[in-house]
Amino acid sequence: MALLFISAVEDPEVWRAEFARALPGDEFRVWPEVGNRSDVEFLLVWRPPPGSMKGFPNLKAILNMGAGVDYVLGDPDLPRDVPLTRLVDRGLREGMVEFVVHAVLHFHRNFHRYRAQQAAKAWIDIPQILPGARRVGILGFGQLGQAAAQVLVALGFPVAGWSRTRKQFPGVESFAGPGELAKFLARTDILVTLAPLTRETEGIVNAANLAQLPRRAYLVNAGRGGLAVEEDILAALATGQLAGAWLDVFRREPLPPESPFWTHPNVIVTPHNAAVTQPGPSALDLADNIRAIRAGLVPNGLVDKAREY
Ligand code: NDP
Ligand code: OXD
């Protein structure tokens, strides 16, 4: 039986080598060279081109090689009766912890302002506050948000998480559901967005919600560009409602050269690489999931298609 690798952006040869070690008995094919469609049991996908996942009569599962499945669920030709899994792995967690902690510390310690001062050759000491006085809020308190929270709590930041369901997480105040969003935002000086992009979360970082934050708050968007209304971020930066933003994800990627974010003095742009899938460890996790599905077990990271994550 065969695994079919479908990605317009990942290098298939790197993954072929990893799968030769992780799952040696299986043939590894690379889209669009699909061969006999009846042999294909599993699709390994990352940003699959629309329509590429349909027409495999013996498909057992689709395995997404990243955490967010919005690119997969957005394809109207997705075979909806086949299980879909997302990546839940250590490499992504560690990468995201580094990114979020770095971005929070960057704003907390005013490094963005020192950078501007250096450009102006200005030797000015900016008063420091302790982490206990800087409240971090993580919107989307799942695998990645919780991993980042653990380190932020250890550093002394008061951390809150907003999720659909209530959480018990050491040192973190839990807010749940739309009814508690305003309270969560009102106590958040640095907002980290790490929710999946779904019909419910699309545009959640909008003017009305940004206005709930304390004045001169910071935004770190590491989830998806579609979570934010980009014009509303620019407007909040213009009025000083937001003092700065670190944006890793955008509605259009690559970010077009005409985007005002590129040159905004209070915005840091990174190219959607807060956390990247590492083929070595991830191939082992994906292989474990394939073995679990073949054994009739529930795979890790099974996506609820109705919930969209
Ligand atoms: P999880 O599914 O583990 O966590 C998602 C969290 O969002 C959960 O806490 C969930 O609540 C919450 N959530 C979802 N919908 C809602 C809603 N409508 N209202 C309130 N809370 C909601 O995902 P991960 O932590 O693994 O990943 C999060 C996202 O990070 C991915 O979907 C992806 O888009 C992004 N990502 C970005 C990367 C980058 O490089 N920039 C790299 C990797 C991921 P509950 O727990 O109650 O279900
Ligand atoms: C992911 C990503 O969702 O890298 O894994 O964006």
Image (cartoon, rainbow, N blue to C red):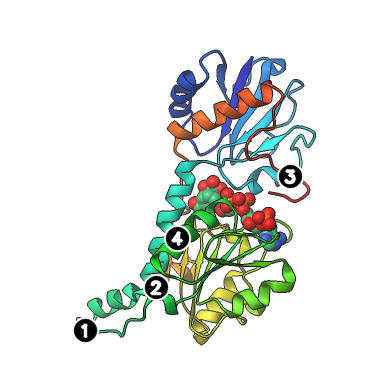
Which residue is identified by label 4?
A: 100
Mark 2 lies on residue: 107
Which comes before the other along the chain, label 4 or label 1? 4
The residues tagged by marks 4 and 1 sit, at their Cα atoms, a distance apart of: 28 Å
Q: CA distance from mark 1 to mark 2?
A: 19 Å
Q: Earlier in the sequence, mark 3 or mark 1?
A: 1
Tell whether label 4 touches label 3 (CB within 8 Å). Answer: no
Say what secondary structure mark 2 lies in.
Answer: helix
Q: Is mark 3 within 8 Å of ligand 1?
A: no
Please provide percent x and percent y for residue 112.
Answer: 34, 74
Viewer-nearest of labels 1 and 2? Answer: 2
Label 4 to label 2: alpha-carbon separation: 11 Å
Up the image or down, 287 lies above or below 93; here it is above
The quarter of the rendered structure image containing the N terminus is top right
Separation of marks 3 and 2 at Cα, in angstroms: 35 Å
Which badge, 3 or 2, is on the more N-terminal residue?
A: 2
- Would residue 238 appear left or right of 175 to someone viewing this image? left
Q: Residue at x 36, y 69 (%)?
A: 106
288 is higher (above) or lower (below) than 258? above
Name the residue at 32% across, 81% down. 128
